[in-house]
Amino acid sequence: MKQTYYVSMGPMGYISQEKSEMTVWRGHAQFSMKVKIARVRNTPFGRELSRQMVLCRVCPFGRNESLDPIDMVYQHCLLLLRRLAPQTSLQDLSLECFLHSPTDHLELVDADNAEDIRIEGEHEVVYTPSFSMSPMRTADLPESCKAIRHIQACRTCIMPTNDEGQSLTSVQGKIMTGEGVLMYFKPRIDFREPEFEHELRIMSRIDEAGLRARIKVPRLHGIVVSGENGETTIGLLMTMITSSGMGPTWKAQASRARLRYTKIGNSKSLPPYRSCMPMGAGALKILLDDERRETVEGDEQGLTRLFQEWLPSHAQPHEEGPYTTWTQRMAQLSE
């Protein structure tokens, strides 16, 4: 039976000897929490937190020797988070909703009696994209991509999963359009904006070169936009490919497409490209050696590792419980 996606993710944060900041997602809501040692120093909670922070070296995104301070703050706030966001289900939510997620900013401070702490905060519903989405102005798209079809974000919705207990950790994945068609959504993500534009150019060039009917790769269906006139672009919408036994065929087709694209990119009328696939960036670093990034050889190495090593090893889905800690998540990503 199909299960509804839910979100209960975090905490993810930053620790130093002076403060701790973190983010937690529950369903459609985001919580940004912080605590400064100077504001809780005289409380039992503050003294223990200070002791834990001294043990941690400064390192962003929770990649510390110890995550105890983050978990300590999270556990103290958990009951409040559950009251503010009791529902973690994402049923019937469109992609538009993730651009305007309700956000609570919370801070832990000492109470009037100086022996306890209280949680201060404010609730706001503003333009706060979740899951690290990084929208851009549609007017700033590359000139060659401005004629691509627009799909309104409000006319798409997250699809349920077959895996019971699976928590959504990204809006990237299977969605359904207003016409009832299954598609694959790939958002524009913080710190990966160049990769998004590079991929958009590649897919539009595949169309221009007339290769859509010859290769079995996801086809660009359009860009997902927000706003009355589509003035904001949030991601790509591609055709859904679900077959799992096509690895060798896909590799051969992708290799042929790479060779043709390289020739197109090196013609007199178009700027040269050293590679056509953003292998070796972000989550793709495992696919090739650093010295081969942005080279034709790197493309070939990446394709080989992707289709012959990575995809076969991930054929069986990972089982996740209803709550995945940040430490567990990082361990999974580093496997």
Image: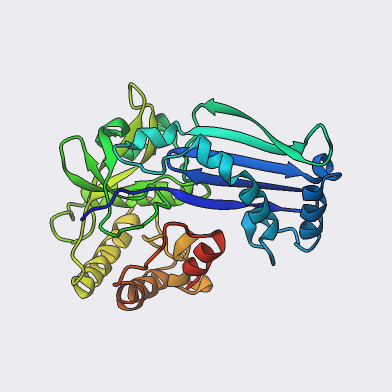
Residue toward you, 140 or 310: 310
Can you say whether 327 is above or below 111 in the image?
Answer: below
**Residue 11: in sight, yes or no?**
yes
Q: Is residue 241 left or right of residue 291?
A: left
- Residue drawn at the location 21% of the way across and 53% of the way down: 240
Q: Which quarter shows the N terminus? A: bottom left
Quarter holding residue 297: bottom left
Residue displayed at 76% across by 37% down? 109
How is the model colour-coded?
rainbow
Q: Residue furthest top?
A: 228
Total numbered labels placed on residues in the image:
0
Measured as percent of width and height from the top left, residue 176 is found at 22, 43
What residue appears at the point 71 percent right and 36 percent down from the top-left corner? 118
Tell me residue 50's x, y (percent): 81, 54
Q: Answer with left or right where residue 12 lies relative to residue 299.
A: right
User: At which x and y percent is residue 310?
Assistant: 36, 74
Closest to the observer: 147 or 87?
87
Whether residue 133 sits left or right of residue 238 in the image: it is: right
Residue 327 position in % (x across, y down): 56, 64
* Vertical placement of residue 60 versus 178, above or below: below
Q: Residue furthest right?
A: 42
Whether residue 18 is visible here, answered yes or no, is no
Outermost residue, left direction? 213
**11, 273: nearer the viewer:** 11
